[in-house]
Amino acid sequence: MICIMANAVNSTIPITVEVFKKHGVDNPKKILAVTTQNVIRANAFVAELKGLDPAPVNFPIIGGYGGKRILPVISQRTPKVDFPLDQPTALTGRIQDAGTEVVQAKAGAGSATLSMAYTGTRFVFSIVDMLNSKKGIIECSFVKSPETDCTYFSTLFLLGKRVEEPGYRPREDDR
Ligand SMILES: NC(=O)c1ccc[n+]([C@@H]2O[C@H](COP(=O)([O-])OP(=O)(O)OC[C@H]3O[C@@H](n4cnc5c(N)ncnc54)[C@H](O)[C@@H]3O)[C@@H](O)[C@H]2O)c1
Ligand SMILES: O=C(O)C[C@H](O)C(=O)O
């Protein structure tokens, strides 16, 4: 499994997939972008607004990585806290701008280092759990995806082997 954090992941993921393909390894399911940064920030912002513990707050961030490509699906939040009508729009903007804010504040001296360490760790722990056969692990990641007209897209997905249905024949690339 290859988990890429180096930006711009919207480009580094397709480049890596193509380089591997050129060298005879065509398995985009194993090349994943770490976009968890946006997810934990979004959860923390909602928790902050509602005075909640951020740990159980959750909703998907789909699309790409960075700025307007970040699409928080706030309507799918758990727990189902209420917002005044204008708040989800403001929150979306805050989530989309949060990374840029940190990078600008660092003024060329690196990026969101600590949260990068935290989110990288969380994502890799999910991968390790999946490799250790833990079930039901769901993450968001920017990957080669058949979900939309975009060749690469981030959605929620279940990590692990494809569910075995009648007639299913496992293939080497199913993990
Ligand atoms: N996906 C995410 O959640 C996320 C979050 C934060 C940062 N990032 C990205 O992570 C990357 C690293 O961020 P950082 O703050 O650690 O940056 P940094 O500038 O502190 O470190 C980058 C390192 O790469 C090295 N380097 C540069 N060019 C190289 C080359 N050609 N070969 C080998 N090494 C090279 C530099 O010497 C430096 O040590 C950046 O691309 C940043 O945008 C991603
Ligand atoms: O979103 C962030 O933390 C910023 C960004 O990913 C970066 O490249 O530094």
Image: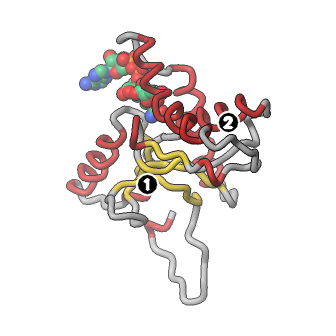
Which kind of residue does numbered mark 2 sit on?
Answer: Val
Q: Which mark is residue 78?
A: none
Q: Are the residues flagged by discs 1 and 2 in contact, CB closer than 8 Å? A: no
Please tell me in which quadrant of the rendered image residue 114 appears: top right
Disc 2, SS = helix
Q: Position of residue 88 (x, y in %)?
A: 59, 41
Please determine whether, in this image, residue 110 is positioned above or below residue 24. above
10 Å neighbourhood of mark 2: few (<14), some, or many (≥20)? many
Instruction: Tell me the quarter of the picture where residue 164 sits.
Output: bottom right
Q: Is residue 133 above or below residue 70?
A: below
Q: Residue at x 79, y 33 (%)?
A: 52
- Residue 141 image offset from top left, x and y in percent: 49, 48
Asked if one can make out residue 124 in the rendered structure from this viewpoint, the answer is no
Q: Which mark is residue 46?
A: 2
Q: Residue at x 25, y 57 (%)?
A: 21
Q: Secondary structure at mark 1?
A: helix
Q: Judge whether residue 40 can be spotted in this image.
A: yes
Q: Residue at x 49, y 50 (%)?
A: 62
Mark closest to the chain's N terminus, 1 or 2? 1
Residue projecting furthest to the left: 22
Judged by depth in the image, the label closer to the viewer, 1 or 2, is 2
Outermost residue, bottom side? 167
- According to the picture, the residue beneath numbered tag 1 turns out to be 30
The amino acid marked with disc number 1 is: Lys
140 or 79, which lies in front?
79
Ligand 2 in which quarter: top left
